[in-house]
Image (tube, rainbow, N blue to C red):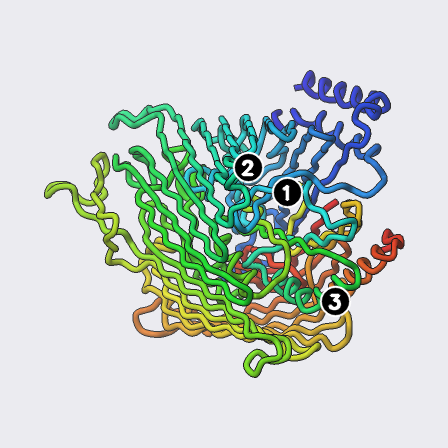
């Protein structure tokens, strides 16, 4: 150990002493990065799931830096969880460099060694990404090469995946190609129609040490996609397939997996329409066959539902079911013209969205095998047949109108159905809820504004009704807000009794350029909070919190 | 021990801070996609020597929509006055990126919009939270940046754009 420290010191000394020499070569390079620290002092409160911790205070922080010089780039991120804040996986506890890479790129080639994030197509068979505020990071650690030609881009990679402070057991190999047909033929280059094709292949290797079953060590998956754009129309489609991959999420069945996503859209000035369809069957793809929860995802099958930014609208979000779901989403955005009878002086924006997700149809493979029985082919499924269980639906409509230079109003209504067993994994009554929201901005002086937000959620299930009120004051970079969230409780027959509960929260903050500091005190429910001009996912807490955020 | 492995590299990077150019920072070169599927390098972003606003946003981000809607109301005036162009970078992932085109057209935004589905450009720009807005001078160098949007933030932006259009120094902002 001492040797290694000495070595580290020697290298760093060397690097300092050669700065002058290097500046000749490296002159003109740039260093940039970002920093975030969240500290939370906890008051005990078991009622909201924010328990006291032995350390009393928890801190999550990172500092990321990137050095670029012409085609060369190197970056790293130091991360600290001392301990991790409540709501984050306890395996995060610790500190160190969780991310580092070197990269060279020019107009043709792009090589990265170390950690990287990558997505093939829409990400169905490969997507690595990071969401710091959600405690998610499945970055690849390996080598990636991209080669760009006029019409064709090819990417190849081999890597292991980050799993908290370790690497997962599986090796991921992948190749992806995307072809722009318009750039392939000269006669087609100015065409109004644009056409793209893409294909990818991903394989995972993990040793099989299972005494009972003969498990595939190499699991291959492939995907094909196309996109067409013509005038206001667009059509996008991607299909993916995976060979048999018995794993912990599918109860170790030997069925093959497949998934499809399609999107049809039309838009013109003042009008946007889109329809999305998706079906996925046994398509949970991870670099470790024992992984569950959020661990070691290789493929990404998104929840095709709207991601809401109001706390009560976001209270019952759909959890995507990669191993079986079939759904659709439709969206219409329309703007009533400025200076029209209905549109008013500044115009009015209307946004309607509907999404629904169902189970897929499953049939037993024979009379003696139960559906999903371990070690069997599991089930068979008719591609076009819908299952009989509803997982989720969400209908929402939002109207936004600027009334005058000083007043701006948004109204929203939402109706949601939430299958408890599917989305939360426990057998409680499914939730049917109506949500109404009113959001008003009053800019009473330049640089001075007040923001009022009222939300109400009505349901007879789960925790019962909720209401929330917020007043926010903004003056130049300064903001202050009071949020009162109230759960009315639930004492209806057939439900676990939930006592009413108030969550008062006060927050103050200051933003200067790319630096933002905010402090909060009170009780907060986990979820999304949009205050002081940004939206953030926050964990449940009770006590004092401090956040610093900066980019440079 | 593994945690120490990268210490030298880290220190090396820190030491490089001391000789980064003092001038304005150029835009990193990253590939993003247009709303009709074309891959475009950020190095091609230009506006004939006039200033550019780059705004990172997402369909699920209320303050971002608020910012882009607020600017949309005055965008024509800003363009007439300063020649500015707004480039809106959506960081929606494949879950919500299908909603970008309908939203942009449905709201009648007259911006140049790109998709950054896996946040490559966002990371390269050091953006943690959206909205995050940059102003580039006529040479394509970043001269100002700001995170968060509240009413009145747009007034500061136009003040800077006016100065840039008049060739004045904006380092005081």
Left or right relative to A149: residue A234: left
Residue A302 in percent (x, y) is at: 43, 49
User: In the figure, B38 relative to A528: above or below?
Assistant: above
Q: Are marks 1 and 3 on the same chain?
A: yes
Q: In terms of image quadrants, where is residue A449?
A: bottom right
Residue B13 in percent (x, y) is at: 75, 31
Q: Secondary structure at mark 1?
A: helix
Residue A455 appears in view = no
Query: Disc 1 or 3, which lies upstream in sequence?
Result: 3
Task: Please tell me which residue is depicted at 61% across the width and 47% down the height of the picture.
Answer: A55
In the picture, the disc for residue A117 is 2
In the picture, the disc for residue A453 is none
In the picture, the disc for residue B77 is 3
- Provide the residue designation for mark 1: B123
* Dot 1 crowding, Cα within 10 Å, few <14, some 14–19, many 20+: some
Q: Secondary structure at mark 2?
A: loop
Task: Please tell me which residue is depicted at 72% across the width and 25% down the height of the picture.
Answer: B8
- Contact (Cβ within 8 Å) of mark 2 with mark 1: yes
């Amino acid at each position: 150990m001492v040797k290694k420290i000495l070595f580290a010191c020697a290298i760093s000394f060397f690097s300092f002493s050669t700065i002058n020499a290097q500046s000749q070569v490296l002159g003109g390079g740039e260093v940039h990065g970002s920093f975030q620290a969240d500290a939370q002092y906890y008051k005990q409160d078991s009622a909201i799931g924010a328990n006291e911790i032995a350390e009393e205070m928890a801190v999550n922080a990172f500092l990321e830096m990137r050095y670029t010089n012409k085609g060369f780039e190197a970056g790293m991120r130091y991360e600290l969880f001392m301990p991790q804040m409540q709501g984050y996986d306890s395996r995060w506890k610790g500190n160190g460099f969780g991310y580092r890479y070197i990269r060279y790129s020019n107009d043709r080639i792009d090589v990265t060694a170390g950690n990287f994030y990558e997505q093939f197509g829409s990400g169905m068979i490969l997507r690595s990404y990071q969401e710091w505020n959600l405690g998610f990071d499945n970055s690849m650690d390996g080598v990636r090469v991209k080669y760009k030609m006029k019409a064709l881009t090819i990417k190849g990679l081999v890597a292991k995946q980050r799993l908290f402070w370790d690497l997962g057991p599986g090796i991921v190999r992948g190749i992806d190609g995307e072809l722009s047909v318009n750039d392939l033929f000269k006669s087609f280059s100015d065409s109004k129609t644009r056409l793209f094709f893409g294909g990818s292949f991903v394989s995972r290797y993990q040793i099989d040490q299972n005494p009972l079953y003969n498990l595939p060590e190499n699991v291959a998956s492939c995907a094909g996609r196309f996109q067409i754009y013509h005038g206001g129309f667009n059509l996008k489609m991607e299909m993916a397939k995976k060979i048999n991959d018995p794993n912990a999420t599918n109860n170790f069945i030997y069925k093959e997996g497949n998934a499809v996503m399609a999107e049809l859209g039309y838009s013109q000035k003042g009008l946007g329409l889109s329809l999305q369809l998706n079906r996925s069957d046994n398509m949970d793809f991870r670099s470790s066959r024992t992984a569950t929860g959020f661990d070691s995802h290789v493929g990404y099958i998104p929840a095709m539902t709207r991601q809401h930014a109001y706390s009560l609208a976001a209270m019952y979000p759909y959890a995507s079911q990669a191993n079986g779901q079939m759904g659709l989403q439709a969206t219409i955005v329309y703007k009533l013209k400025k200076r029209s009878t209905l549109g008013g002086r500044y115009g009015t924006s209307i946004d309607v969205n509907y999404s629904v997700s169902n189970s897929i149809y499953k049939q037993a493979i024979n009379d003696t095998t139960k559906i999903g029985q371990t070690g069997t082919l599991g089930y068979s499924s008719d591609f076009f047949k819908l299952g009989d269980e509803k997982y989720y639906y969400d209908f929402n409509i939002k109207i936004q109108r600027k009334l005058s230079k000083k007043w701006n109003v948004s109204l929203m209504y939402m109706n949601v159905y939430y299958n408890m067993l599917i989305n939360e994994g426990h057998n409680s009554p499914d939730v049917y809820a109506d949500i109404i929201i009113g959001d008003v901005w009053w800019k009473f002086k330049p640089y001075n504004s007040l923001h009022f937000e009222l939300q109400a959620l009505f349901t007879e299930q789960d925790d019962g009704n909720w209401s929330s009120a917020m007043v926010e004051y903004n003056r130049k970079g300064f903001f202050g807000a009071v949020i009162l969230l109230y759960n009315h409780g639930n004492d209806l027959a057939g439900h676990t009794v939930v006592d009413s509960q108030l969550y008062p929260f006060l927050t103050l903050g200051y933003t200067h350029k790319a630096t933002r500091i905010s402090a909060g005190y009170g009780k907060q429910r986990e979820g999304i909070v949009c205050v002081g001009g940004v939206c953030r996912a926050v964990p449940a807490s009770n006590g004092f919190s401090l956040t610093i955020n900066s980019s440079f | 021990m593994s945690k120490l492995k990268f210490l030298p590299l880290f220190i090396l990077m820190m030491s490089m801070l001391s000789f980064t150019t003092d001038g304005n920072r150029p835009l990193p070169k990253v590939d993003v996609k247009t709303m009709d599927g074309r891959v475009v390098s950020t190095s091609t972003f230009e506006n004939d020597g006039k200033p550019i606003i780059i705004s990172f946003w997402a369909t699920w981000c209320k303050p971002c929509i608020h910012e882009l809607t607020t600017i949309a109301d005055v965008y024509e005036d800003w363009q007439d006055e300063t020649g500015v162009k707004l480039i809106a970078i959506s960081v929606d992932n494949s879950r919500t990126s299908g909603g970008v085109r309908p939203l942009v057209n449905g709201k009648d935004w007259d911006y140049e919009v790109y998709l950054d589905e896996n946040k490559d450009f966002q990371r390269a720009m050091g953006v943690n939270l959206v909205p995050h807005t940059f102003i580039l001078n006529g040479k394509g160098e970043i001269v100002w940046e700001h995170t968060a949007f509240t009413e009145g933030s747009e007034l500061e932006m136009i003040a800077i754009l006016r100065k840039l259009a008049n060739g004045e120094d904006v380092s005081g902002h």
